[in-house]
Image (cartoon, helix red, strand yellow):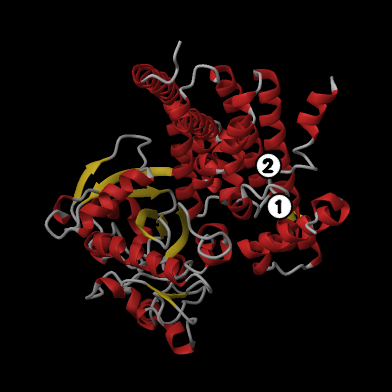
Amino acid sequence: MNAKIKETLLNPIFKGNPITVLVLGICSSLAVTVTLKGALVMSLSVIVVTGVSSLILSLLRNTIPSRVRIIVQLVVVAMMVILVDQVLKSFEATYAIDKQLSVYIGLIITNCIVMGRIEAFALGNKPWPSTLDGIANGAGYGLILIVVAFFRELLGSGTLFGFDILNRFGYVTNNLVILPPFALILLGCIVWLQRSIQKDLQEK
Amino acid sequence: MNTNSNVYTVIYTAIIVIVVAAVLALVSQSLKGRQEANEKADTISQMLTAAGFGTKAEFGKMGNAAVIDKYSAEIEEAFTVGIDGEKKADLPEGKVFSPKELKALNYIIKDPEKAEEAALPVFRFKGGLTVVPIYGAGLWGPVWGYIAFDESLTIRGAYFDHESETAGLGARIKDDPSFQARFAGKKADFSAPERSAVFEIVKGGVSGEDGALDNKIDAITGATMTSKGLDEAIDTWLYAYGAWFNAIPASACDIQGESCCCSGCQKSCCASCPCEKCCTSEDCTVSCGPDCCSEQCGCCSDNCCETKSEEE
């Protein structure tokens, strides 16, 4: 693995994380982080959508007329989102979780990370690095989602992946944590933490 | 090639759109069967949960095939009734109503001109349980569910689902078993003059005096609009079923046989009745002791017990 590919893969996970550094995809990270299971399925869906649409659009990049490139991107991303939704609905194991995530799967299309990475990376790079970039950005998004969901499910419902954890000790569920504002507070704390570690992100 | 010419742009976008449409149509068609099977199993598990044959989580772990087996083992008959209370037709075996079908029915029963045409589904399970659906509008999207009544038309259980109510607030109609448990033991007022009085979900809690009325339950804190929407849905649908519930047809009585005495239905529909007087639900103030006709009557009036003891 050469240095450039390594950089493409690792940069979005921490240093250039789409949520905490680029501040993209905030709304869905507030909405789907009530339970860990939901966050996990959402992360995997986003990884698939960003990865595959980056690949397809990178393959097409030299043929796309530049005046309609956003529309072409939109069509491809929309197709991927619908496919992911349809597949989730088709399996017994994921049907219930798809129902729980409801509109948010469909709203992956409005997730700025997807279009942002295609526009910024996939249209100017070869298919293989573009796919990796898509997957890595999806994973960076997913990582934050899972961290937020971990705290929200644990402190909100007292469970993890639906198993009783704090509940066993008579923990009273906390509605503030279940509601979206707490996700924003948590995200704020994560951004704070990251900026105090990574000094170069701080504005002068 | 000039990728910026108008002709190229038009042809390019047309091809992209056609290819994408073809892929989506193909996938949608090939997965349709699986998706419908999942939705059906989900609907069935909602009905079984309402009727108290298990919890939704248990059914979720069982898998589709086991849920459908359980349903076939417990269902007695399924048919449709009109708003006039007359039975319309038997439903084909295994037929259930998806939220989409309930939505279509909801439009019909709310439209005074079309309401006559409505064919409302009734599912009768073993143990004298009758399960009926409800459907309406919550805060962000539709809410629907199933309510199970026992022979005395007391609510045995309920299960509700929603499309997009707020997690932790309105979504509690689905996620909070303690909310659904509030329905158990309540009754719907099928002879209510107004639709809105059939059942009530009360904001601010059911106080002592209200508590005596058994068609009221406490609403969900922080989810006023969802509670109202659910209340409206229950009112609309149970009002439509009112005529049928008020005059449970003779065919239903045959099934109930002897045990139907004193359990809220007409005495005339019992094959033989061990009690002298058949009590209606209004008469029920006291539960009978073991030496009275308590085996037959879940609850009966003093009158019933007296007549019985005089006879002995």
Chain letter of the residue beneath label 2 in the structure image: A
Nearer to me, A149 or A156: A149
**Amino acid at dot 2:** Leu
Residue at x-position 48% and y-position 38%: B41
Q: Is residue B53 above or below residue A117?
A: below
Q: Mark 1 highlights which residue? A: A149
Q: Secondary structure at mark 1?
A: helix
Query: Where residue A22 sits: x, y (%)?
Result: 68, 47
Label 1 to label 2: alpha-carbon separation = 9 Å
Nearer to me, B278 or B242: B242
Is residue A161 at all visible to an observer of this figure?
A: no
Q: Are marks 1 and 2 in contact (CB under 8 Å)?
A: yes
Number of labelled discs?
2
Residue at x-position 47% and y-position 82%: B206
Residue at x-position 36% and y-position 53%: B133
Q: Looking at the image, which residue sits at the far top?
A: B1
Query: Where residue B47 sits: x, y (%)?
Result: 45, 49
Q: Examine the image and state in which quarter residue A184 appears.
A: bottom right
Q: Secondary structure at mark 2?
A: helix
Judge from the rendering whether residue A9 lies leftward or rightward of residue B132; answer left or right.
right
Q: Mark 2 highlights which residue? A: A40
**Amino acid at dot 1:** Ala
Nearer to me, A167 or B274: A167
Q: Residues within 10 Å of mark 1 (few under 14, many from 20)?
A: many
Q: Is residue A58 above or below residue B261?
A: above
Is tag 1's residue or tag 2's residue first in the polypeptide sequence?
A: 2
Q: Is residue B100 above or below residue A117?
A: below
Query: Where residue B84 sits: x, y (%)?
Result: 16, 58
What is the quadrant of the C terminus of chain B in the image? bottom left
Is residue B160 at all visible to an observer of this figure?
A: yes
Q: Examine the image and state in which quarter residue A168 appears.
A: bottom right
Query: Where residue A80 sits: x, y (%)?
Result: 52, 29
